[in-house]
């Protein structure tokens, strides 16, 4: 078990079984963990954390998949990508901050010759390294080394000929074989699935496939206006009707096929639209935009953003040695709820949702200050002037 102290109590991380839990001071004390230094005054609510819990770190921009919707605009290796020593120094810094998980991606992370050296180094420093790849170039030599990873997720937006629904190419057979290789070694494997209008009606086939392959879970990602996906965003995004129907459909299919599913933070407005009980939503650790707080995105060159879909903040990973640099760079997102406009200002889920996806808001409206324009409640407000 790994842990770190926070004003409200602390955060506990376990690898077996895998979980991350925010707990209060009394719970920390029940584990014989006490820190007067971190707990001045009365019990505090969860707010701005001392450090992110997770970092999405692109190992390289190099990739041969050529997906038409790639949010990282990957292809060629960039000239100034961190070398092995620099990457290890970045890992040292993140570990020293108390980060728990490092999600390694790209590009195609396995194209780095030193990838497993870096993953093993992260594990040695107390970080859980996870990996997201396309799966089109996986080979048995990779599989033998993957036991160092917490989980491997393969990108899959459709089954069979539907694989290329957004990617523009059909690599399904290669990816299907990769699932089999990983499962044969007993390595936890999941699916990263981008959801938009074109594959909304393919959800059941994806769940059926996940059940057949005995994946750990499906992580549903919203089609976002980032990288090469920007040009096609308005054509590929979910409709308002689909946004309202999405969560009940995922829930029903998850129960039918007994496959765990997750929705990324940009889908929180769609979850909150259905008015879930607060104890359930808090209990599941559900949260909306936590850019710069729970999460950071880092490019292969070491440039830091609030998440992988937001623009470069001007910070490098090495600037994070100064704790105030992070809170200053991401103040727009960290304090967004203090000045939330309507209808968010009167929404009971404001402190959970935090205005939805600000990357989408900025692209559609031109401002990070606006609420997520695809939130069903915002759509209703803009049409009728009435908050739900």
Image: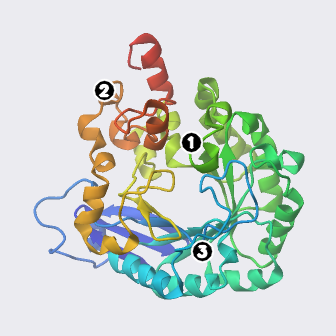
Q: Nearer the viewer, residue 370 or 270?
A: 370
Q: Is residue 84 above or below residue 154?
A: below
**Res 143 quadrant in image:** bottom right
x and y percent of residue 164 in the render?
81, 48
Q: Which numbered disc, 1 or 3, marks the residue closer to the eye?
A: 1
Q: Is residue 124 above or below residue 217?
A: below
Q: Nearer the viewer, residue 256 or 370?
A: 370
- Neighbour tally class for label 3: few under 14, some 14-19, many 20 plus, Cα within 10 Å: many
Q: Residue furthest top?
A: 384
Say left or right for 35 vs 240: left
Q: Is residue 204 above or below residue 219?
A: above
x and y percent of residue 174 in the render?
86, 64
x and y percent of residue 357 in the render?
46, 41
- In this figure, which residue is indicated by the disc labeled 3? 150
- Neighbour tally class for label 2: few under 14, some 14-19, many 20 plus, Cα within 10 Å: few
Q: Looking at the image, can residue 49 be seen?
A: no
x and y percent of residue 75 in the render?
68, 63
In primary-sequence order, the first of circles 1 and 3 is 3
Q: Residue furthest left?
A: 41
Q: Which mark is residue 225?
A: 1
For the residues labelled 2 and 3, the Cα–Cα distance comes to 40 Å
In primary-sequence order, the first of circles 2 and 3 is 3
Q: Is residue 284 above or below residue 80?
A: above
Asked if labels 1 and 2 touch by Cβ distance under 8 angstroms, the answer is no
SS state under label 2: helix
For the residues labelled 1 and 3, the Cα–Cα distance comes to 29 Å
- Neighbour tally class for label 1: few under 14, some 14-19, many 20 plus, Cα within 10 Å: many
Say left or right for 334 vs 252: left
- In this figure, which residue is indicated by the disc labeled 2? 346
For the residues labelled 2 and 1, the Cα–Cα distance comes to 27 Å
SS state under label 1: loop
């Amino acid at each position: 078990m790994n842990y770190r102290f926070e004003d409200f109590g602390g955060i506990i991380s376990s690898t077996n079984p895998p979980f991350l839990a925010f707990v209060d001071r009394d719970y920390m004390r029940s584990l014989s963990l006490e820190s007067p230094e971190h707990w001045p005054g009365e019990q505090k609510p969860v707010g701005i954390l001392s450090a992110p819990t997770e970092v999405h770190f692109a190992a390289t921009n190099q990739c041969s998949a050529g997906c038409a919707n790639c949010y990282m605009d990957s292809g060629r290796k960039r000239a100034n990508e961190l070398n092995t020593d620099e990457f290890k120094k970045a890992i040292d810094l993140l570990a020293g901050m108390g980060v728990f998980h490092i999600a390694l991606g790209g590009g195609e992370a396995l194209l780095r010759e030193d990838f497993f050296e870096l993953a093993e180094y992260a594990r040695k420093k107390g970080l859980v390294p996870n990996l997201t790849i396309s799966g089109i170039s996986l080979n048995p030599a990779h599989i033998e080394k993957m036991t160092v990873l917490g989980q491997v997720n393969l990108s899959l937006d459709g089954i069979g000929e539907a694989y290329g629904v957004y990617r523009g190419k059909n690599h399904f057979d290669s990816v299907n074989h990769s699932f089999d290789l990983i499962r044969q070694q007993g390595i936890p494997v999941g699916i990263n699935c981008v959801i938009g209008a074109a594959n909304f009606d393919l959800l059941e086939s994806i769940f059926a496939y996940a059940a057949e392959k005995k994946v750990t879970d499906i992580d549903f990602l919203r089609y976002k206006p980032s990288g090469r996906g920007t040009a096609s965003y308005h054509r590929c995004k979910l409709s308002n009707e689909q946004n309202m129907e999405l969560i009940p459909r995922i829930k029903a299919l998850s129960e039918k096929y007994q496959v765990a599913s997750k929705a990324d933070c940009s889908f929180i407005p769609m979850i909150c639209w259905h008015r879930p009980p607060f104890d359930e939503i808090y209990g599941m650790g559900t949260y909306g935009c936590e850019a710069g707080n729970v999460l950071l995105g880092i490019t292969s060159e070491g440039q830091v953003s609030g998440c992988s879909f937001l623009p470069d903040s001007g910070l490098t990973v090495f600037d994070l040695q100064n704790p105030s640099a992070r809170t200053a760079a991401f103040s727009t997102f960290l304090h967004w709820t203090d000045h939330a406009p309507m209808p968010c200002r009167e929404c009971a889920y404001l402190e959970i949702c935090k205005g939805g996806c600000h990357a989408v808001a900025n692209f559609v409206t031109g401002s990070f200050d606006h609420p997520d324009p695809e939130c069903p409640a915002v759509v209703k407000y803009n049409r009728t002037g009435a908050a739900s």
